[in-house]
Amino acid sequence: MSTYRFKLQALQYQCSKLLRWCLDLPNDEVDVTIADLTEHGVWFQGWMLPAEGASVRPFIRQGDSYHFFERAVNRDDVIKAVLGDSSSQHPERQCGFREQVIIEQGEWYFGAEVDGLPIDLMAAQVVGVFSVLHGKDGWLFLDNDTNRSVDQFTGKILLTEDVKSGWKRYFNSTALLAEQKKCPFALLIAPAKESVYSEKYPFVKADITAIDEVLGLLPPNYPLVYPVELLRRAAIRSFRITDTHWSPYGACVASCAVAEALGVGIKKLTQMFANDAYRLRKSGGDLGNKLFPRQAAEEAMLVGFSYRKFLCYDNGFENFGRILVLHHPGAIVQKVCLVFGSSSSYSMFDYLSRIFSEVIFIHTAGSIDESVIELIKPDYLIAQTNARFIVKAPETGYQLRNTLQEKLSQMPVDKRQAIYKASKSTSNASQLAYIKDLHEYLPTAAL
């Protein structure tokens, strides 16, 4: 669930009839949810003192709409601290207010009506905990993310020598692993949205960026799929306007590109998806949902097929450590494909599940656990990461059990038990033998 905060700014004003005031709540340190803003209301609490003989009414203004607060809360603390009077009979004793208000706009003002004249005292803006960068034509991009996407694009962050060494090890190790297992392999790096639609981005790309450095480290004939040009030329827009990830059609383009790199004929792939239908639908996405009010855009969404119909195992984890197994008997390639992927993989499931009859997904952002390969013995192997993650090299010595152990240990007991129970139930119901073994990756000691 998206959380928000208020960015508050005191405004200059001149009014001798307004003696003192304070808005205690809301402040800029407390998170609020969309339900707080639109359903329950946000708590407004404070106090206001007029000069002698004047009348005041605190208010919140959203556009041209005013909501006035009744000063009806006893604030003996204010009377004593501000006016130096400890009497419980002071006429301004009830100078406080406390009330919940629904927030309908991304900007609002707190103020006072003094003798009938409204005065704005403070401006407020609803902002996401993570900033969103506004591009051209309503396009949204990541801003202050932990991978510093803007600095990567503008060349302020490049690869350290240690990271370069890590990428070289990864390239060499994965190539050797694929050769040893006699398993077709490809690394798919999902391009950053700003690399595909740079004309919508408010910054200019540097001559050399971190992704350029990664590409420059590639050994000859390494099976990398980095489909920037394919996504730029896509018949339907390949990235979502208010989301960091590619659109469903962009996921189709990427799925076909990586399958072709694995040796699946492009003619088969083209025929498989030729009759797919897309319908325009308003969608917020992971960026639009961070804004208030929520920003949405029309997106071409796939209709008539969902991989969820073929989902036969889900260990219930979020992000890293999640395991999904898809089994689609009608796929064009009756083989097993193992994917060590990231968030961009999820929208590919609608396509990968129709290419390969069995798709096993492990959320590792491209890092590889060889024990899982030994367990599954896949016919095809995909590693997938996102371009913004490349400032840290993935690894081939990844230990899935360690990730699951760590995440389970940080969960409340009831959630741990619920995940294990649901996972075990799903694994018992499956006809695929290795799913029971995947389930055993959940360490019972942590339960």
Image (tube, rainbow, N blue to C red):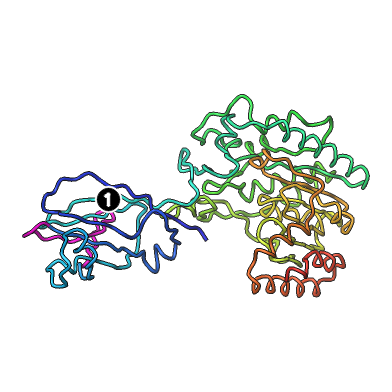
In this rendering, position of residue 51 left or right of residue 376 = left
In this rendering, position of residue 11 left or right of residue 149 = left
Q: Residue furthest top?
A: 207
Question: Quick one: label 1, few (<14), some, or many (20+) residues within 10 Å?
Answer: some
Across and down, in percent, residue 179 comes to: 92, 42
Q: Can you say which quadrant of the picture contains the C terminus? A: bottom right
Q: Is residue 175 above or below residue 249?
A: above
Secondary structure at numbered mark 1:
strand
Q: Let me know if residue 304 is in the magenta part.
A: no
Across and down, in percent, residue 102 comes to: 34, 64
Q: Is residue 412 above or below residue 358?
A: below
Report the number of discs.
1
Range shown magenta: 51-70
Q: Let me know if residue 54 is in the magenta part.
A: yes
Q: Nearer the viewer, residue 20 or 273?
A: 20
Would you identify the image quadrant in which residue 42 lies? bottom left
Would you identify the image quadrant in which residue 333 lies? bottom right
Across and down, in percent, residue 18 comes to: 14, 54
Q: Nearer the viewer, residue 46 or 318?
A: 46
Determine which residue is flagged by label 1. Answer: 122
Q: Image point 84% across, 29% down: which residue?
A: 220
Across and down, in percent, residue 201 comes to: 51, 35
At label 1, the amino acid type is Met
Q: Nearer the viewer, residue 55 or 180?
A: 55
